[in-house]
Image (tube, rainbow, N blue to C red):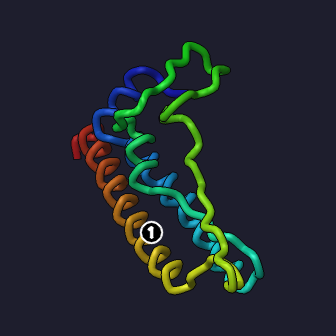
Amino acid sequence: MENKLTQMIFSKVGVPQYRNFLNLTSLRHKLISSNVANVSTPGYESQGIDFQKEIQRANGNTSHLVGYTTDAGHLPLGQHPQKSPRVHSTNVEVGEMNSVDIDQEVTRMAENELMFTVAARLLQKKFDGLRKAITSR
């Protein structure tokens, strides 16, 4: 259970933004893995997310309208940060077995893994800094 002080400290060092970034790279990795696993499935439509757009939305950096919720049971409207990322599919072209380009998927997977690793290490440094500040070591 988080209290206001904990939320304030974590927000000040950017933990929620790192959490959003790591969650999106994790989702992207799952989608890419699914695309690679279905590379020989006839009619399969590759899936993906608009990563830049989703990270801006998750961090509240969007110029679009956002619905205001007053209760946890309310549905998020518009470009709300708590709304699930929008997954899109690529249509299968006529004459192709499916819409998976294995070269692009492997490149995206390597790029995504690198982004996840860097973000995780930066978050680890943030926690190390907090630990040093708390313990004075």
What residue lies at 46% left-to-right and 54% top-to-bottom?
A: 22
Image coordinates for residue 53, horizontal then vertical, percent: 41, 49
Q: Residue furthest top?
A: 70
Residue 28 in the image: above or below residue 46 = above
Q: Residue at x 31, y 44 (%)?
A: 131
| Residue 50, position as x, y percentages in the image | 47, 56
Q: Is residue 35 left or right of residue 26?
A: right
Badge 1 element: helix
Residue at position x 23%, y 47% in the image: 137
Q: Residue furthest front?
A: 94
Question: Compared with residue 91, is residue 16 higher up or lower down, i.e. above or below?
Answer: above
**Left or right: 121 with respect to 110?**
left
Front residue (pair 27, 48): 48
Quadrant including the N terminus: top right
Which residue, as the protein is rendered here, is positioned at the far right? 42
Q: Residues within 10 Å of mark 1 (few under 14, many from 20)?
A: some
Which residue is denoted by mark 1 in the rendering? 112
Residue 55 % position (x, y): 41, 48
| 26 is higher (above) or lower (below) than 61 | below
Residue 120 seen in the current view: yes
Q: Amino acid at mark 1?
A: Asn
- Is any atom of residue 10 visible in this view? no
Question: Residue 17 occupies which quadrant of the picture?
Answer: top left
- Picture coordinates of residue 21 (x, y %)? 43, 52
Query: How many numbered marks, from 0 up?
Result: 1
Nearer the observer, 28 or 127: 28
Could you say which quadrant of the image residue 93 lies in? Answer: bottom right
